[in-house]
Image (cartoon, helix red, strand yellow):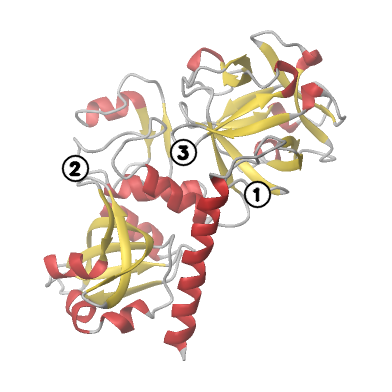
Amino acid sequence: MIQIRTAIYKLLSLTLSLIIICTSISIPTSAYSEADLIVSNTLYYIKNKNSGKYLTVMSNSDSNGANVVQANFNAGKGQQWKVVHLGNGIYKIVSEVGTKTKVLEMHYANNNNETNVDIWADGNTSERRFRIIKNSDNYSYRIASQCSNYTKVITVKEASCQQNANVFQYQYNGSKNDEWLFEPINNYSVSLAVNYAITNYNQRVTTYPSMNKIGGDCANFVSQCMAAGGVHYQGTWWVYKINNNHATPNNTNELDLSWKLSDPSPWISAYEFNKFWSSRVKTEIVSAQDILNNPESIFAKPFYRGDVIQIVDKDFLGNPTNAWHTMFITGYGSYNGHRTFLLTYHTSDVKNKTLIEIASKYPNSYFKFFTIN
């Protein structure tokens, strides 16, 4: 009975994903389309694609005209935004500070480049209304003002990576500092996480360092997928860009010059990722042989799209704890007539490879499941 319920759940999840995809490519006949995968009346942290810092109301102020900047993640009300669809693809973006009645606005409804961004009491006026438009990268969005006829967007001044750098309105040109990631605050979005993984399985995102030249990019990539779905910086699990000089560091010195991470870092290290998340989420270890010999029972376990699997080997005590590869569950499929999980990961850049195939490649290893969803 458990296996039947699990199979039904996963089939419904796959069907919903197909509906979302079909809906996202439909062409509106009389209005702008809604933002794909962004859910109305939902709270988000909004992260700049270039700097990795978050759209923030200065000093958590609830005053009219309170300035909006970018800042490191702090989970404060000044970084929390409710996205509200008003119909016809038009949105207001409500700050959670104070009375929760102030909205993002272009100062004085000015249509010029470099018009400042602040918050103000809500009103049905063009400087307080926006379109949230998915960019051609298929995972980030631009926030386009109605007062500019949606040609100008919220942008970080001078593509800065500095704390409290100002944001303003500027003509959209796809320069990354005018593009944003929406990370849901209260619920893990499997759709956003999986969309991020599938879209970026064979490319690197400038928000984060590329670790291919320094030991491998697998944990770094899976951490990004989790963040995209709404798992927020915590403990030692975080990364910040200092400058744009070394997007793909060749060594640890270049990494330290352009990026700030904890040391050691569970964001980029498979070994540390295992240690960090094992104490925070439900985990289960199974052998490769169990996957190969009992694939249906493994598939029936309560793990789903948006969860994580690591390959682990035994430590010097004989315990299967030495994690060395990290993978993201992006779907469900079959192999030799057996249902199984589809895994996507970096370093070797693979999309939707079956767990059974991977287990057959490493028959003496163990596989550790992490419940993220």
**Dot 2 alpha-carbon crowd within 10 angstroms: few under 14, some 14 to 19, many 20 or more:** few
Residue at image position (20%, 73%) is 319
Q: Secondary structure at mark 1?
A: loop
Vertical order, 372 against 236 (above or below): below
3D distance between C-alphas at marks 1 and 3: 16 Å
The picture places residue 356, in percent across and down from the top left corner, at 22, 70
Q: Is residue 39 left or right of residue 325?
A: right
Quarter of the rendering containing residue 63 = top right
Q: Secondary structure at mark 3?
A: loop
Going by the numbered disc 1, the residue's amino acid type is: Val
The picture places residue 79, in percent across and down from the top left corner, at 65, 37
The picture places residue 58, in percent across and down from the top left corner, at 69, 26
3D distance between C-alphas at marks 1 and 2: 37 Å
Going by the numbered disc 2, the residue's amino acid type is: Gly
Disc number placed over residue 39 in the picture, else none: 1
Residue at image position (61%, 18%) is 166
Residue at image position (63%, 55%) is 186
Question: Of all residues shown, which one is farthest toward the front?
Answer: 29
Residue pointed to by mark 2: 215
Q: Earlier in the sequence, mark 2 or mark 3?
A: 3
Quarter of the rendering containing residue 57 = top right
Q: Is residue 138 left or right of residue 103?
A: left
3D distance between C-alphas at marks 2 and 3: 28 Å
Residue pointed to by mark 3: 138
Q: Is residue 199 left or right of residue 58?
A: left
| Residue 236 visible in the displayed image | no
Going by the numbered disc 3, the residue's amino acid type is: Asn
Q: Earlier in the sequence, mark 1 or mark 3?
A: 1
The picture places residue 294, in percent across and down from the top left corner, at 24, 84
